[in-house]
Image (cartoon, rainbow, N blue to C red):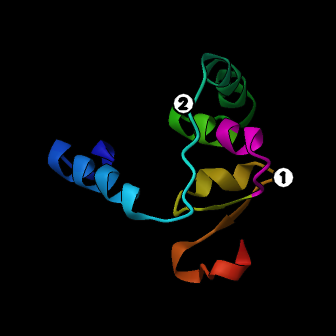
Amino acid sequence: MESNGLGWKEIKKFIVSLKKYSGLDVYSISLKDRIIATNHMKKFKLSFDDALCLQSMIANNLLKIVSLDPDFDKIPYIQRVVPNQYHPNSL
């Protein structure tokens, strides 16, 4: 979020807003997830943040991600959905 020019106020506002979504599950990232993510960094040439997202997806049996980041296209078993093409039934 910082890399997109957002400051702490905007980031906090976004994170607090997540509490309003019904049905949203928040996954707590473990130390083990962080360690495994470094393997994804090496294998797919991902940033740590992207590798951590991938590991969180694997841990939760998710195969699709809504993202503008084309780095997820490097992962053969993940399907990236561009936000403007997202439809709730597509995931």
Q: Which mark is residue 52?
A: none
| Residue 21 image position (x, y, % from top left) | 45, 64
Q: Is residue 51 above or below residue 4?
A: above
Of the numbered discs 1 and 2, the one sitting upstream in the chain is 2
Determine the CA span between mark 1 and mark 2. 19 Å
| Residue occupying image coordinates x 75% and y 38% | 59
In the rendered image, the vertical position of residue 10 relative to residue 43, given as above or below = below
Judged left or right of residue 53, residue 79 is right
Helix, strand or loop at label 1? It is: loop
Position of residue 33 measured from the top left corner of the image (x, y, whole percent): 66, 25
Q: Residue furthest right?
A: 77
The amino acid type, in three-letter code, at marker 2 is: Phe
Question: Which amino acid does the dot numbered 1 rest on?
Answer: Tyr
- The percent position of residue 45, horizontal first and vertical second, equals 65, 34
Q: Residues within 10 Å of mark 2 (few under 14, many from 20)?
A: some
Name the residue carrying label 1.
Answer: 77
- Taking the magenta stretch, the answer to whether it contains residue 61 is yes
Closest to the observer, 91 or 73: 91
Q: Is residue 24 left or right of residue 89?
A: left
Q: Is 27 placed above or below 19 here?
A: above
Q: How many marks?
A: 2
Image point (54%, 30%), residue name: 48
Which residue is labeled 2 in the image? 48
Picture coordinates of residue 18, whole percent (x, y): 39, 57
Say which of 55 and 12 sits in front. 12
Out of 44 and 27, give the one closest to the viewer: 27
17 with respect to 47 (left or right): left
CB contact under 8 Å: marks 1 and 2: no
Q: Which residues are magenta?
A: 55-63
The residue depicted at 52 percent of the width and 63 percent of the height is: 68
* Label 2 SS: helix
